[in-house]
């Protein structure tokens, strides 16, 4: 299955399945009362917990690349479009990516760290480059439909600044 097909048909289903497996104390680490903001601690992606064991190797690669992009989009939106962020978060429900408790649980990690968390080794830089045009179009549709005042070229420029080189 190609990345585009995976993202459009399975990613959000797999993301929900993965999130359902995470303990509530970790899943809502930053929002324990309202339980509206989902957090993924770095270690939850590791093979130690096995929360991704329901995916085969190729699905896991597509999943982690997709996760990288939604975390990136959320981070860029939060950083550069704070006034619209609540609406964005409400629409997308994209998870936050944080460090592990005792040392980094209060820190939002760079999305690139998702690749250092999983047990599948692959050339993530080439996968990101291959997938970037498709996800750019996907996020552009979301922004055009809901935030017409946002300059899409500028938004994507902010994303590109965070892509690995």
Image (spheres, rainbow, N blue to C red):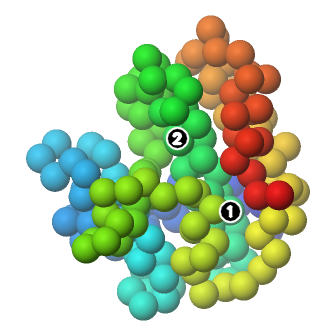
Query: Which residue does the image show at 48% across and 82% down from the upper left?
Result: 46
Q: Earlier in the sequence, mark 1 or mark 2?
A: 1
Q: Quadrant of residue 101?
A: bottom left
- The residue pinned by badge 1 equals 65
Query: Which residue does the image show at 72% across and 85% down from the upper left?
Result: 121
| In the depicted structure, whether residue 85 falls above or below residue 2 | above
Residue 60 visible in the picture: yes
Q: Quadrant of residue 114?
A: bottom right
Q: Quadrant of the C terminus?
A: bottom right
Using the image as rendered, state which of residue 6 and residue 123 is in the foreground: 123
Give the numbered dot on residue 161. none
Q: Quadrant of residue 29?
A: bottom left
Using the image as rendered, state which of residue 102 and residue 140 is in the foreground: 102
How far across and down, in percent of the image, does residue 8 sit? 68, 50
- The residue pinned by badge 2 equals 74
Query: Which residue does the image show at 43% across and 54% down from the upper left?
Result: 108
Left or right: residue 120 versus residue 20 is right
Query: Which residue does the image show at 71% across and 16% down from the upper left?
Result: 151
Distance Cα–Cα, label 1 vs label 2: 14 Å
Between label 1 and label 2, give the one nearer the viewer. Answer: 2
Instruction: Say how many tags the image has.
Output: 2
How far across and down, in percent of the image, does residue 124 sit? 77, 69
The local crowd at label 2, few if under 14, some if 14 to 19, many if 20 or more residues have their Cα within 10 Å, is many
Left or right: residue 96 versus residue 105 is right
In what element is the residue under mark 1? helix
How far across and down, in percent of the image, does residue 1 sit? 80, 68
């Amino acid at each position: 299955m190609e990345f585009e097909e995976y993202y459009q048909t399975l990613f959000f289903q797999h993301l929900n399945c993965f999130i359902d497996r995470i303990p509530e104390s970790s899943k809502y680490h930053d929002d324990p009362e309202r339980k509206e903001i989902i957090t993924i601690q770095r270690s939850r992606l590791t093979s130690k917990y096995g929360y991704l064991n329901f995916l085969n190797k190729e699905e896991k690669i597509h999943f982690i690349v997709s996760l990288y992009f939604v975390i990136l989009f959320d981070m860029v939106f939060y950083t550069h479009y704070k006034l619209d962020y609540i609406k964005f978060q409400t629409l997308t429900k994209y998870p936050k990516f944080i460090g592990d408790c005792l040392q980094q649980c209060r820190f939002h990690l760079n999305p690139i760290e998702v690749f250092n968390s999983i047990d599948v080794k692959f050339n993530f830089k080439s996968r990101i480059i291959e997938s970037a045009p498709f996800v750019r179009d996907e996020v552009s549709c979301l922004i055009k439909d809901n935030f017409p005042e946002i300059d899409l070229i500028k938004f994507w420029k902010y994303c590109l600044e965070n892509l690995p080189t």
